[in-house]
Image (cartoon, rainbow, N blue to C red):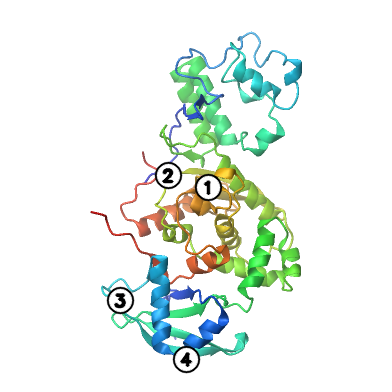
Amino acid sequence: MAQDAKPTRHNRTITVDCHNEATFFALLSDGKAFIEFVLAFFLALGFQLLHKPSCSAGGSLTLHSHYARIRLGGLTIWRLQCPTCKAVFTVLPHFVLRYRTMRPDVARDALLATHGGLSLAWCATIGHSSSMALYRVICAFGQHSWVTVLTQCGLPLPTYILADEKHSRCLTEKVYLPTIVNGRTLWHLGYSASTSAVAFTESYGEFQRASLAHEPSYQGGAP
Amino acid sequence: MSFNARPLRMSRRTRGGRPDRWLRQHDQKYASAVSAGAPGFVPAPRPQQASGHADRRLSLSTPGVAHALPRSAVPMSPAEKLAGGGALGQRLRRFVDHITATGGEEHGERGRHWFEEKKSGWYAVLEDPQMPAMSTSLDQAHNAMDRKVFAMQGCHHPGGSPAALLTGLAHVDTLIPSQRRAKNAALCGVEVEGGRVPPSDWMLNLQILTSGGYRHAPEPPHH
């Protein structure tokens, strides 16, 4: 029996800094205060919520539902909904990582050690975790494209870029990392086992597509 | 936006009021003042210059000695290598510039074509005022990825996604305040490029920016 393909759900998780866990638990008991806190938080950041394209209002939110996350000790996760476009946003407190049981402070130490050059295995050891858990945390962060992340920081799409491929090895295989940088920021880092121009063009095309999706009139790379 | 290999032009960008030492300057007839009969022959350094950077100092300060010596004639110091001065793309480009200056435009164009075929994925979008003089940041990014990913144990998961892992590591690399130069001390890559990160905590930034539910709100135009 053929099944209808379900449309991919958009990730509308929002992480909110509650300063400490006690504040978050106190807010859970007051729905109105919770919504106001969330609104104040992302407005202070200068962000907007990712409503559906058809939504023109995008101003108010209502409590939609909540659930308890058993693996986090029964932590209550609230979901807010836009009454206009019906988009639902899952509100995660800052001390929770999406779909992970690893605490952010543990991940923070491990990532810092990784950044310093320590292996994943050692980073996991000092964090009393497993290297696979750390691997998955990093991969979860890597699901988001650079264009999305960097433009949220107010960076314009680069007018001038440098692109090159790094020849490297993954175990015994030779691999190539097509890279696009602008100044200190990376805008694309691909992974290709093939050295053909087609593979590289395809990899660089990811940046092009992401840029055009963000700004259809983008003419970066052309003087 | 074109991602095809484009003819690379010579850059005469100055740094700190000093012309790029390796490139032929506009008032110079030839790129290299070293006689054609003695290719690659550099006068011996003075005793006080005989250590690490002797060759570079000599080529800069001694009248009549080339500003645009081919790199093969001047051994690179370890510090220079660390600074990314030996980037293959830049070296090839300078080689083509050298051919253009010494052999004429026709030969330079042939060299350019050879360069494009030799390294088809290397793109540098050039406009003199804004083009980076060196691909230092690109080299740094590549080397960092090489060190952190492919040289360490425990990250080669058979069913994993190297691309996602790389992207996640690069997000960490971009957001951790790791700048050591005085001008950009304690700033992350985004801040160095003029972006704004939400709070001061890099881990919280990583969580917020990779949440998925936020989008950047452009500032209203000022009247």
Picture coordinates of residue A142, whole percent (x, y): 55, 64
| Disc 1 element | loop
Q: Of label 1 and label 3, which has the lower sequence position?
A: 3
Q: Chain of mark 2?
A: B
- Characterize the local packing of mark 3: few (<14), some (14-19) or many (20 or more) Cα atoms within 10 angstroms: few
| Disc 2 element | loop
Which numbered marker is on residue B3?
A: 2
Inter-mark Cα distance, 1 to 4: 44 Å
Q: Could you tell me which residue is drawn at 68 percent across and 15 percent down?
A: B42
Amino acid at dot 3? Gly
The residue tagged 3 is A59
Q: Is residue B112 left or right of residue A60?
A: right
The residue tagged 1 is A184
Q: Chain of mark 3?
A: A
| Disc 4 element | loop
Amino acid at dot 4? Ser
**Mark 3 and mark 4 residues within 8 Å of each other at the beta carbon:** no
Inter-mark Cα distance, 2 to 4: 54 Å
Which numbered marker is on residue A46?
A: none
Q: Nearer the viewer, mark 3 or mark 2?
A: 3
Quarter where residue B33 is shown: top right
- Characterize the local packing of mark 4: few (<14), some (14-19) or many (20 or more) Cα atoms within 10 angstroms: few
Q: Nearer the viewer, mark 2 or mark 4?
A: 4
